Image (cartoon, helix red, strand yellow):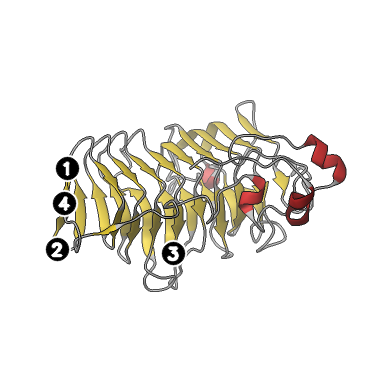
Amino acid sequence: MAFTALTASASAATTSATSTAAATAATAGRPGKVATTQVNCMTVPSKCGYPDATNAGVPAGTKLLSVPGQISSGPGWHYVTSGYVEVNGNGAVLSGLYIPYNLDITGSNVTVKNSRIVTSGYFAVSLRHTSGVTIENSTISGSNATTGRAGVDITDIYGDSTGMVIKSNNISNFKTAVQVSTGMVTGNYIHNPGYISGDHTNGIFDTGSTQPLSVTGNTIENSFGQTDAISLDASQAGQVIANKTVENNLLAGGSYTIYGGNSLGNSSNHMLIKNNRFGQDYFAKSGQYGPVAYFTTSSTNIWSGNVWDSTGTAIPSP
């Protein structure tokens, strides 16, 4: 689905409280492109060009075939009677499916689109040793927000998959929404996490690497006071974190909304956090304790153009 940043107008001013002067400055742009003249975008993200339920996920009117009741296999994929769907064929395309099970992908250059995947298991969509997988225009969630929440809605289990594109999906009812260390995560609506006592709740979770990862144009809402909307932190000391881009996102919630990679004394380089909008719907500081933690600016670590959603004013470099 295409996302279009709206030109400010009298009607848009009602919902995003755009001033008269700002209306003349607002211009069309790419998905989630920050226009500091717009405010309160968290109320209706699509009014400001960000993804929400109106423009992410399965396109309206799409007819879905239920697996395995109406269809149980196709080129490169099949339903396994123990209760999951296996995609092992390189180049397989899955479209227009309702899958109430884990979708496990071991083939490369696989495309999953216009589908709904719902499960209460550890993983909704799992990737194992893949390359070039695209997941787009799909609705992916746990079965409910409590005991039926998915452990991870989309995960690269072994952390060795490459070239993933996760685009324009509607993702909810998770402990962690997306767990990857490389690829592109763009235009997704990530919202309404689930919770079981003891959970650490993440929007996008990179376990810490130097592989390039681009997180752009997403709406990520974590209504809990833990853990984050985006984490770039490693899980142990002695690692270098590098080559991560977080740009043009609408973000809110968690303990800190972004963890920037420098926890546990780890070093980082070539980290770009730019033109993001931090919502204050859950906490006055976006996260319970602030918008960002463990991010050290340097000649290669850039914090620029990040603003408060309620006012459009700049957030100083941490």
Residue most extreme to the left: 81
Q: Residues within 10 Å of mark 4 (few under 14, many from 20)?
A: some
Q: CA distance from mark 3 to mark 2?
A: 23 Å
Residue 174, x across and y down, in percent:
42, 61
Q: Amino acid at mark 1?
A: Pro
Q: Nearer the viewer, mark 3 or mark 1?
A: 1
Residue 308, x across and y down, in percent:
73, 49
- Where disc 4 sits, the SS reads strand
Residue 264, x across and y down, in percent:
51, 47
Quickly name the residue at label 4.
Answer: 73
For the point 59% across and 64% down, which residue is it?
Answer: 225
- Where disc 1 sits, the SS reads loop
Quickly name the residue at label 1.
Answer: 75
Residue most extreme to the right: 21
Q: Are marks 2 and 1 in contact (CB under 8 Å)?
A: no
Q: CA distance from mark 3 to mark 1?
A: 30 Å
User: Which numbered disc covers residue 82?
Assistant: 2
Q: Amino acid at mark 2?
A: Ser
- 266 on left or right of 95: right
- Where disc 2 sits, the SS reads loop
- 305 on left or right of 146: right
Is 294 placed above or below 254 here? Answer: above
- 190 on left or right of 274: left
Q: Earlier in the sequence, mark 2 or mark 1?
A: 1
* Observer-nearest of 25 and 245: 25
* Observer-nearest of 59 and 308: 59
Q: Are marks 3 and 1 in contact (CB under 8 Å)?
A: no
Q: Amino acid at mark 4?
A: Ser
Q: Quadrant of residue 107?
A: top left
Q: Earlier in the sequence, mark 3 or mark 1?
A: 1
User: Which numbered disc covers residue 173?
Assistant: 3
